[in-house]
Image (cartoon, grey):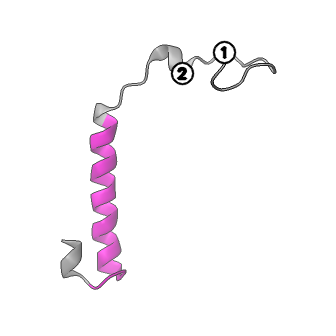
Amino acid sequence: MLGTLRPYSEAWWAVHDEIQAENDRQLGSKLVICPRCVDSSPLREDVTGSVR
């Protein structure tokens, strides 16, 4: 669809944004984050993101 529109025109951006929103919706429906991975306990100062 984007190929039929003038690049970066207002219509092009509208279609582009719709495509991106649909891609985000699809990803959001498939994405599952492990509850352990989103632990809300505060991190200690001596803890890095990958090594505890």
| Position above or below: 15 against 32 | below
- Residue at 36% across / 25% down in the picture? 32
How crowded pointer 1 is (Cα within 10 Å; few <14, some 14-19, many 20+) is rated as few
- Residue at 32% across / 82% down in the picture? 7
Which quadrant, please, contains the C terminus?
A: top right
Dot 2: what SS? helix
Magenta region: which residues? 6-28
Q: Which residue is mark 1?
A: 41
Magenta includes 52?
no
Q: Which mark is residue 11?
A: none
Residue 34 location in percent, x, y? 44, 18
Residue found at the very far front of the displayed protein: 51
Of the residues shown, which amino acid type is indicated by label 2?
Val
Of the residues shown, which amino acid type is indicated by label 1?
Ser
Left or right: 51 in relation to 4: right
Which quadrant, please, contains the N terminus?
A: bottom left
The quadrant holding residue 13 is bottom left
- Residue at 31% across / 40% down in the picture? 27
Residue found at the very far right of the displayed protein: 45
Q: Which residue is mark 2?
A: 38
The quadrant holding residue 30 is top left
Which residue is more in the foreground, 49 or 44?
A: 49
Residue 23 location in percent, x, y? 29, 50
Left or right: 11 in relation to 49: left
Dot 1: what SS? loop
Q: CA distance from mark 2 to mark 1?
A: 9 Å
Magenta includes 17?
yes
Provide the major secondary structure of the magenta segment: helix
Left or right: 37 in relation to 49: left
The quadrant holding residue 41 is top right
- Residue at 34% across / 47% down in the picture? 24
How crowded pointer 2 is (Cα within 10 Å; few <14, some 14-19, many 20+) is rated as few
